[in-house]
């Protein structure tokens, strides 16, 4: 139960969550390999009932500044506070005072981030290959 660091043996479970969570931007195993190498400390999983039900990948860009590369919770386990816990755990583990991300303008996760205190900084028109805009959001801590 709870949050721990990702281990490569978890990848199959992570891919299951990935496939049910994203349709346009599904990552391949190679993409996960890349981020595993780049940010092991910030790749966390949430376990419940001996099962991985969520994950977050936060890259530390510079001291105190993190960037959410990916975040997803298994559908059945959403709206139970797991996404929020994954974010808060990365903030304390990585000693962050700022957390940033880009998200598709039409993604319902925008509301989730706003609930957590993230603010919209800027929009990027047609940022994604299919023409959708991106929102750049940030959360200042302390
Ligand atoms: C976004 C996501 C990670 C949220 O995870 P979660 O575990 O369901 O979120 P939580 O339960 O911690 O929610 C925290 C708060 O946000 C709210 N919230 C969560 N999802 C929401 C949504 N789609 N719309 C509005 N509010 C939402 C919750 O109601 C909760 O509010 P509360 O504090 O008032 O109770 C999850 O919906 C998901 O995996 N989505 C698909 C993948 C994705 O889009 N990831 C983000 C890519 S940048």
Image (tube, rainbow, N blue to C red):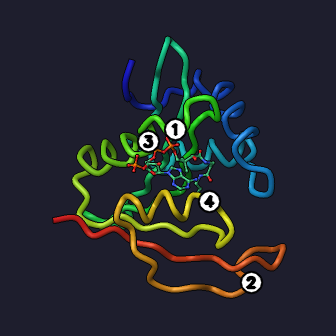
Taking 128 as reference, is 142 left or right? left
Tell me which residue sits at (25%, 63%) in the image.
Answer: 64
Earlier sequence position, callout 1 versus callout 2? 1
Q: Distance between the residues labelled 2 and 4?
A: 18 Å
Label 4 Cα neighbours within 10 Å, binned few <14 / some 14-19 / many ≥20: few
Percent from the top left, x then y, of residue 91?
29, 51
Residue farthest to the left, as pictured? 142
Earlier sequence position, callout 3 versus callout 1? 3
Taking 9 as reference, is 115 left or right? left
Q: Give me the disc on residue 55.
A: 1
Q: Which structural element holds mark 1?
A: strand
Percent from the top left, x then y, of residue 83?
46, 43
Q: Name the residue under label 3.
A: 40
Label 3 Cα neighbours within 10 Å, binned few <14 / some 14-19 / many ≥20: some
**Split into 4 quadrants, where in the image is the N terminus?**
top left
Of tags 3 and 2, the one toward the viewer is 2
User: Is 132 in front, or is 9?
Assistant: 132
Of tags 2 and 4, the one toward the viewer is 4
Earlier sequence position, callout 2 versus callout 4? 4
Percent from the top left, x then y, of residue 36?
53, 42
Of tags 4 and 1, the one toward the viewer is 4
**Where is residue 98, by image quadrant?**
bottom left
Label 1 Cα neighbours within 10 Å, binned few <14 / some 14-19 / many ≥20: many
Earlier sequence position, callout 3 versus callout 2? 3
């Amino acid at each position: 139960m709870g949050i721990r660091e990702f281990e490569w043996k978890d990848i199959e479970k992570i891919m299951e969550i990935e496939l049910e969570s994203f349709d346009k931007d599904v990552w391949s195993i190679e993409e996960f390999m890349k981020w595993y190498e780049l940010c092991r400390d910030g790749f966390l999983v949430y376990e419940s009932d001996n099962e991985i039900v969520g994950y977050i990948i936060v890259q530390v860009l510079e001291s105190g500044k993190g960037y959410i590369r990916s975040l997803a919770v298994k559908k059945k386990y959403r709206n139970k506070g797991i996404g929020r816990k994954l974010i808060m755990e990365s903030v304390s583990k990585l000693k962050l005072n700022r957390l940033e991300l880009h998200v598709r303008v039409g993604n319902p996760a925008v509301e989730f981030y706003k609930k957590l205190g993230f603010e919209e900084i800027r929009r990027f028109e047609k940022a994604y290959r299919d023409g959708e805009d991106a929102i750049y959001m940030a959360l200042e801590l302390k």
